[in-house]
Every structure is written in C-alpha cells, then in structure tokens.
Image (cartoon, coloured by chain):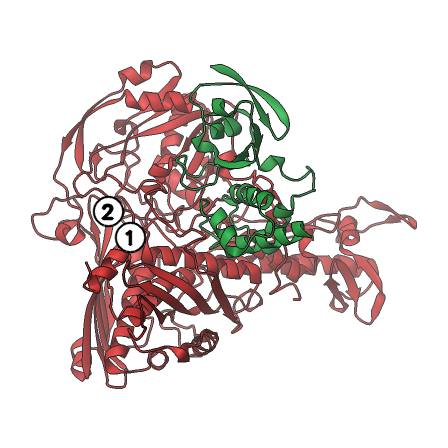
Amino acid sequence: MSLIGKSPVRPDAFDKVTGGKDFPVNIKVPRMLHGKLLRSPYPHARILSIDTSAAEKLPGVKAVLVPSEVPTRKFTPVYFVPANAGSMVQDMLIMSDTVRFAGQPVAAVAATSLRIAEQAIELIEVEYEELPTVFDPEEAMQPGAPQLHEHAANNVAVNPVMGFGDLDKGFAEADHIFEGVYNSHRVHTCYMEPRVCIVDCDRQGNFTVYSSTQHLFGVREKLAYALEIPESKVRVIKAPYIGGGFGGKLDIGYIEPVAALLSKKTGRPVRIELTRYEDFISTTRNPIKVYLKTGVKKDGTFTARHARSILDTGAHATHGAEVINVHGVFGLLMTYRCPNSKWEGYTVYTNNMIGGGYRGYGSPQACFAAESQIDEICEQLKLDPIEFRRKNAWHQGEPHPMVQGLNLDSYAFDECLQSGAERFGWSKRQKPNSGKGVKKRGMGFACQPLWVSGCIGFPDIYEHSGAIIKLNRDGTADIATATMDIGSGQITTLCQIAAAELGLPMESVHMVQNADTTTVPVDAPTHASRTTYSSGNAVQAAARIVRERLLKVAGIMLDINPDQLSVVDGKVLIKGAPKRTLSVAEVVTRAESPFVQHGPNGPAPTTLEEKGTIIGVASLAPKANPSPVSVEFVEVEVDTETGEVQVLRVVYAHDLGKLIHRNGAEGQVEGGFQQGMGYALMENLQFDPVSGACLTGDFLDYKMPTAMEMPRDIQSIFIESNEPSGPFGAKSLSEPCITVPAPAIANAIYNAVGVRIRELPITPEKILAALGKL
Amino acid sequence: MKTIQLLINGATHEVSIEADETLLQVLRNRLDLIGTKKGCDSGGCGCCSIQVDGKVVYSCMMYAVGAAGKAITTIEGLGNGGTNLDPLQQAFIEAGAVQCGYCTCGIIMNASELLATTKNPDEDQIRHAIAGNLCRCTGYTKIVDAIKLAATRIAG
C-alpha cells in the first residue's frame, strides 16, 4: 500500500524525453503506400460525376477509391457502443455521393509517396450539384429548412425527453423563477499528435491495423462493421503511446476504412495521416444552446427545473446522439436534487462539421449553464452560493440518483466545498464590481456535483476492462491490457496498482508494448474518466490471482501454508520468521523449472504441482458508477479598458476516492484547467458562414492558452472518501477538471465587473460590449 | 533530387532530397530522427523545435537546403547517449512534466537554448521562452517546474 498516493517515476518518461519512439505517427512498415483524401469544397452537394483517369495515369499512383466502391451499410463511427446500438444513429458511409459538410471525403488515392498522392488528388475531377445549406441548428429545425437526411424530420437526429415530478406544480410552488439562455461554441481537443493509421490487408482478406486511437477494440468492431467483414478478420495493434486524445480519437475516422479499402485494392499497407487542418475538421465538442428555467423557494431550495438543449451535431449524428444524453442527465437533471424536473434534448443535423467526444462529453456545456444560473439566483436573492449548493446537493449514503441499487457510498461534496473555500480565501470575496481602477479583480467558483467513473446507467455503452499479468523469472511482472495510455498516465497508474497488489517494486512492473486485439481481453475505451477505476479494478483482480498462485508455489517450496506468507518489495515473507525468505524471482524460476532444478545445494527434483507460468487474467465490468465531485475557485483580473481577462489563481478540490499517483493527478487538474480556460476565454473553431470552410485550421488562428496566459498558481486538493468498489478506494478524476473552469471564470468575471456573459467564449469584445464600451 | 550535407548532432549526413523538403521532413522521413515531431506543419505548435547553430527553429518552417553547413541539434543530440541524460531531460522525468509526451522534445529543445544563454532564469523568462510551444496535457505547470529544477542544478 505504501506505493499508493506517491509519485513514482512514469515508466514511459525516459523514452519520451529522449525522443518518444513509440507513437503511432512513427510507425513504418515495408512496402507501405501513402493515402490521401480528396475533400469536398462544398458543405452540401450531390456528386454528379467523378473522373479519376488523370490521377490513375500519374506514375506512382497505385489505387484510387470513389464512393461507388464502398460498402453500403451505414454505421456510427463511435467506438464505445455496439455497432447496431439502438441509442445511436447509423447514418454514415465510408464515402458518400451526397456531401453534407465542407471537407467531407469524396475520393482517395494511394501512391508510393505522399507527394504523389497529394498531386494525384488534385487531378481528380468532381462535378458537384450544390444543394441549399443550413448551419444554425434552430433554423434547421424549422419547416422548410434544407433536409440533410431522409430519416430525420426537421433534421432532428434524436430527441430524448426525460423528467420526473410535476413541473407545473413545482413552478407554482416557487417563490422566484429564473430563465436564461446559455450558449456554447465549437472547440477542438487539440491533441498534439495528428490522427494517423496504417492498414495492411493480406491476400486472404485479413486486416492488420495501427491507429492513433483511444479504443483498441473499438477500431476492430467499427472497421469490421463498416467493411462488412467478421471481427476476427481485423487485428488492431496497440501503440504504446498516443499523443493526446481527450475524446478526439474516440471514433473511427474516415481514414481507417479508406486505408483498409485502398490496401485491399493494392495488396500493400496504406498509411494515412491527417494534416492539422484535416484534424480540425474531424472532431469537435458539440455546441449546445441551453434554455434553462428554474424555480426556487426564498431559501434557495429548487422546486422545479426545465431545460431545453439544442445540440449542433453537424453532418452526421456520431457522438451527438450520446453527448446529448450525458449532457442532459449528468449535466442538468441529476446534478442537484430537484423534485420536479424536465429536460428535452435535440440533436440536430446541420451542414457543419461532425462532432466528437471531447473530454466532459456534454457536461461543460451544461455546467456553464447551470452553475452560471445558480450564481445569478444567489446574487439576486442575496443567498450564499456555497450554502445554496450544499442545500440542493446530494449527500453521502443516499441512493445513487441514476443507478438503481447503488448508493453514493463515497461522496465528499461538502468537504470539497469547505476545504476549497478555506484554501482559496473565499470569505474575502467582495461585492460585484467593487474594485477601483481600470483592472478589477473578482472571485468565482463552480461545481460538478455528480460525475462518473464510466457510464453505467447508459444502456449501450461498453464497460469492460481486462488485464493479463505474468511474472518473469527475474522477479518482474508484465501487464498486457487493451487500455490505451493517451497521455493521462494509464501505464503508470496500472503498473502502480499492480506493483502495490503484488508486493513488487514499481520498477519491476512493465506494461507490454504491443498488445493486440487477438491477445488481450476486451476493453472499453480510455474515456469517461474511467480507467483508474475500471482498468485499475481489472489489473488489481489479475494481480490477486497472480499473488495467490505465487504464494501457493512458495508454500510448496517452503513447506508452509500460503496463509502464512506475504510479498513485500519483491520478497516472500513468512509471518513470524523474518529471516527465512524467498525472492519472487526464485519462486517464478521454480514454477518454470524443468523436472530437476540445479540450485546452490545441487540438483533437486520439482513437482508437477509447482509447475506453470505464474499468470493471472481478469476480464470484468464494474458493478458501480462511483461519482467523483469537484469544486473550483478562481480569481480573475479584468481589464475594463481592453476587456482582457487574466486568471490569477485557481484552487480545485476533488473527491477522487483515493489518490493513486499524486503528480499525475495534479497534472490532470492543471492540464484540465488549460483546456477549460481556453474554452471559457479564447478557443473557437470558426467557419465561413457561406462556404462552411474552416477559418481556424491551424494554431496561428485557433488560439489556445500558452504558458504565458496560464495562471501560475493552480492548487489541487484531493479528498479521499475511499470508494469501497474502487482499486485501493479510487474513483475518477479527469473530466470534472475541464468542466468547471468556464462557469467558475464566468462567475468570477461577474464578481469583478458586474456583467454576466451567457455565451462562450467570453472574449474581450463581449466584455467591452457588456460594459457599454463597444 | 539534390544531395546536401547536414551536420546533425556532431555527425555529417549526406542526404538526397527534393529542393522543397523541410528540415522536419528530412529529419523524420529520410534520416529516421523521429524524436522531432510534426504537430501542425505550419509553425504553430512547436513540436518540431530543434536548434540550428544554437538557436531554436521550427524545423517545419525551414527548408533543409537552408540548413546545410550549419550545426543542427535535435533531441537525439542531448545527453551523452545511453542512460546519460541532459539535466533538462532528467528534470522533466523527475518533475512529472511529461504526459502524452508528444510536445516534450520540442519544449526541451527550446528550454535548452534558454538555459544555454540565461543563468537561473526567472519564471517570466521560462514562460516566455516556451510560449511558442503548445502542450495540451500539462497546463505547463510541471514543465515550468522542470526547467527551474534543471536551471538550479546547472547553476550548481
């Protein structure tokens, strides 16, 4: 246990500071071709004809692919659901002769070099018939708007409606009713490593795949489905590292199936890597407009809440069909107690780019609305915003609001509020707009009172995790798992959990580099803040099996009951006999020895009972959905002449059950704030309103916080409520770190200058306009 | 195709290239020096930062022909090989400044120029020096910590 909560060196750090060789972008295979997609310049069009003859004649071009050659079964690209999931919308083809967003692939080329492939796509002649466009989701819902898909009347892809209690009664009981519209925008996850894949189809139709993905088994399932072949025909090899994901690599891109078909045509492996511009138009956080109406008693108790959320899902439903549910349920319906609630979600097709699964998955949009409005309520009714939230929040031990049969066994919301407020100095907060001078400071905070360590409660989402742990004769252990490390430290955390459970030093546990879908148990993605909890549980379960077997063999060797044995720091210890020990290496060597083992005391026979590699396998799905909670306090300085906002300091308090790796956990908070602050203040994926072309397709135009803009003082408080179902008591961390910054900053800006901005990002122009200076 | 000589990490490489190839393309695709990463290919992210004659450049923004005759240093040139690390590399490991690691080499190359020219830089100088390098994982806090740690050790 002593390893848990410490910060052992990341096993991958040495390689990453000396060159980082194990990213998918570095993979080359013999005879590899380079693929390139031709993309439509039009946001809505019908393809009338494609002439590929000139491209095919270019020396070095090995194949050209056009829409008429792709399978006709529609699919959802989202990894973590079954391909035919009823909650999702199967509306995509690998390539289609109907274009629904600017940048949709309409043809592809494989050539002996990238340069030739780039030249070749320029030679493809496509004749388009342009169709009328719609970019605003509320306009798209109006009668007469251009229809994007036959199956979706008024362009509504899905329309979940949920609620409980009696809304009319609840609003009638309210002393005050508040209404507001909160709007969010389109941002990109900005993983640093581009999306890339290599697909190699052999002559018997077996596909070997390397992909920059967050979900090994998702690639297998979705690629097999899209190609209409059995899953066993697709083998996906895990890349040891992924250069960031944040939800942006949670779905099959166009690239994997296109590379697969090009490989099938050419008989050679095909590599496709996206340019940064292509990355920017491949995945995004969906913009959601939230109409939020809330009834409260004089004392601040919620009596009724009604929310309507309009999600712009772009050309295809993809994640938008699930983001809307997580947004509504976790973000709005269930965050606080309210007896009469109703929520309506609309996932709406437009001619914008498709959405993705960005970290937080609908919650940042909801949290901005809900936590901003709570601040407005408290301001108007002169209520204490901390007490208001405490009054309406859940409490430890109560039934879990979403999952029947579960309780909130660990739920330290009060402690987060209290310790965060104390550390931050919340009691020193001034009245709004009470500063003097040009630059005014303000304090604000926001909460994520209910989140998940996975997605139990949602019917179609995979939750499995698996691990194989094997001991080696030198006393080390190897872990093989399909859990991807996308930078958030899965290699480290899982090795740490295994080391702690096995009684081995951290440096004796290694993550297997290239597990693949044929060798390891099925796994859900690295998403939904789930891996420490779910994969951690699988690793711990496998380690327990290994330890049991290790102690059994050691017991035979020592002629002692295994109950009397333990493993500490790589040594098997006997209770009450501290001097008589065996090393783990000796025990494993014995288990893998021949019939006669030559040791220091000469040859000795071994028994069949001892024999066999010491190995443990676990494949399981968690039973619980433990809810982490978080609170973030920020202080900002607003320049009332320029409208610029600087975040000065941050205190973030989070109940994560049990801290596994302190440094890694702090890194999640600090990195989460970078993304959350970017979302709040500057990042904005913008498109030309007529052509639909992306205007912010590189990092010169898409602004994210650098080291200069980031606050220098970010403090993390980790509350350990000890979740009974988690590995060593752990639950999750990642997503709330990115959810709370935007409303906390918005509330702090209000406190500084007395203006309420309900539309993200909160740019200098919006602040100056609200101050009447623009 | 044109043949040029590049002096990289103290060794001369003769390489045949197209005239319009960037230094980044030549390092990665022709010389397998894959520690230098491509993040955007448009001078916006800093993942491809290397040093030319001791000064940091984005290798995606420099033609390889322009680097002929100059001393190029990449991440592979830091430390003494094997397990011997540059103080910055060691500090990045110890401070936990590495998450996904994709931006890491570029940031180390940039910090390396800073520490070669500035003894004991303060936090402003460190943040300014790495302002051209984007990181999406860390929030930069532990990167700044790592550079401070290395600076302290170098200063003795």
Report in which chain the residue with disc 1 lies: A
Q: Residue at x 46, y 56 (%)?
A: A671
Image quarter in which the C terminus of chain A is found: bottom left
Mark number, residue B13: none
Report in which chain the residue with disc 2 lies: A
- What is the three-letter code of the residue carrying label 2? Gly
Instruction: Pick out the residue farthest to the front.
Output: A437
Percent x, y for residue A722? Answer: 53, 72
Q: Residue at x 20, y 38 (%)?
A: A43
Q: Please state if A167 lies on the left or on the right of B3 as rendered.
A: left
- What is the three-letter code of the residue carrying label 1? Asn
Which residue position holds label 1?
A286
Who is closer to the viewer here, A102 or A555?
Answer: A102
Image quarter in which the N terminus of chain A is found: bottom right
| Chain A shade in the render | red
Percent x, y for residue A150? Answer: 16, 44
Who is closer to the viewer here, B66 or A704?
Answer: B66
Say what secondary structure mark 2 lies in.
Answer: strand
Which residue position holds label 2?
A314
State the separation of the CA atoms marked 1 and 2: 8 Å
| Chain B shade in the render | green
